[in-house]
Image (tube, rainbow, N blue to C red):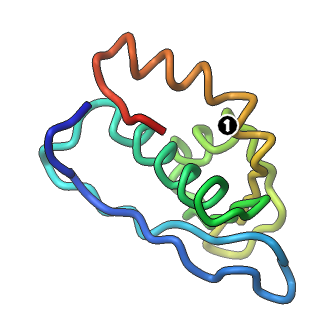
Amino acid sequence: MRARPCGTARLYDFSPPAHPDSFSWGNWIRDKSKTRYAAVDSALLVYEMGFVRLGFSAGRCEVRKGSTKVIAVHRKAGAQVTSEDSDNVHMRLTKADVERVKPKLMALLSRAGAGTQA
């Protein structure tokens, strides 16, 4: 486990009328000390906070269309594209989606000697 933080991610827009029982997350900022697996580690922390601690059943994010690697990571986690606009891809991921991939992600972090206790 990392001894010190390397960034932040924001959870916001809790349970809006169009998407009850969900949260949005994004505005991911990581510094130059981030590890190779910081994205996986921080995503698991976001899901822990949103699904377990806050009790939501779905998470939403919007990703710039040019961020193809980020879109691919979300899709591998089970996220579904819900809409697109001229700049962004809007995605939704459920707690069940995360529970299906969490063991694989935790194993990856464990093998890498990185990771959270999520």
Relative to 83, say whether 118 is above or below.
above
Q: Position of residue 27 (x, y in %)?
A: 42, 70
Q: Position of residue 5 (x, y in %)?
A: 20, 51
Q: Nearer the viewer, residue 94 or 65?
A: 94
Residue lying farthest to the bottom in this orientation: 17
Relative to 84, say whether 14 is above or below.
below
Q: Is residue 5 left or right of residue 57?
A: left
Q: Quadrant of residue 58?
A: bottom right
Q: Position of residue 66 (x, y in %)?
A: 53, 56
Residue lying farthest to the top in this orientation: 111
Q: Is residue 7 left or right of residue 25?
A: left
The residue labelled by disc 1 is 77
Q: Is residue 10 left or right of residue 62?
A: left
Q: SS class of the residue under badge 1?
A: loop
Q: Position of residue 49 (x, y in %)?
A: 54, 58
Residue at image coords 58%, 59%:
53
Relative to 87, say whether 101 is above or below.
above
Q: Which amino acid type is shown beneath numbered disc 1? A: Ala
Q: Which quarter of the rendering shows the N terminus?
A: top left
Number of residue marks: 1
Q: Nearer the viewer, residue 16 or 72?
A: 16
- Report crowding for label 1: few under 14, some 14 to 19, many 20 or more residues within 10 A (C-alpha): many
Residue at image coords 67%, 71%:
23
Q: Quadrant of residue 12?
A: bottom right
